Amino acid sequence: GGGGGEGGGGGEAALSLADSTAFACRFLSDERLGTLFASAAARSEARGWLGGLCFCGLGEHAFPLLQSYIDRSSDVQTAAALLLSAPKGVLSLPLPRHWLDTYRRMLNRWQLYHARCRLDIAAARARSAEGERRVGEPASQ
């Protein structure tokens, strides 16, 4: 099998995701490439495979894939960590906020207060970098 890709079946040698994407970019038309990437994103979403984030990014298009990953693995920590690098505005959307809040509650339940503080600081920095403020927070002067 290949390294990190979605392998074929029937004893075929599977290409890695990077190799198959490179071949597709080189030899397929833009239309077929778009279809291939949409199909790969849909398969990744169905399997909860985080490698599919390279096809959909970390914006709203990634939410179904991340939810599938969480549903299959119960690993909200990875989703929360990924969200800290998400594009502008994502952290203020309801679903990412839910995942971050779920992870915060989990850290509190486990009495991992320092980890919870580091998460809150990272989230505040991410919001600050995107120009967001929490309601009731004073503007910086």
Image (cartoon, helix red, strand yellow):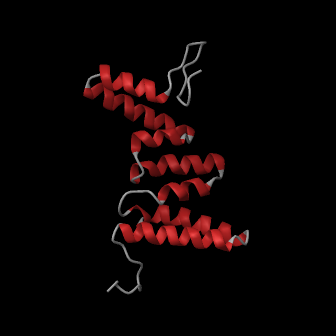
Residue furthest right in the image: 110
Task: Please report the residue visible at 50 percent of the width from the left and 41 percent of the height from the top.
Answer: 45
Q: Quadrant of the N terminus?
A: top right
Q: Position of residue 8 (x, y in %)?
A: 54, 20
Q: Splitting the image into 4 quarters, where does residue 37 fall? A: top left
| Towards the viewer: 59 or 118 | 118
Q: Position of residue 34 (x, y in %)?
A: 32, 32
Q: Position of residue 63 (x, y in %)?
A: 46, 52
Q: Quadrant of the C terminus?
A: bottom left
Task: Please report the residue visible at 67 percent of the width from the left and 66 percent of the height from the top.
Answer: 106
Task: Please report the residue visible at 31 percent of the width from the left and 22 percent of the height from the top.
Answer: 26
Is 120 left, or right, of 109 in this rendering?
Answer: left
Q: Position of residue 137 (x, y in %)?
A: 41, 84
Task: Please report the residue visible at 65 percent of the width from the left and 52 percent of the height from the top.
Answer: 74
Is 30 left, or right, of 41 in this rendering?
Answer: left
Q: Please determine whether, in this image, residue 53 is positioned above or below residue 106.
A: above
- Number of labelled discs? 0
Residue furthest left in the image: 30
Is 75 left, or right, of 43 in this rendering?
Answer: right
Q: Splitting the image into 4 quarters, where does residue 77 fall? A: bottom right
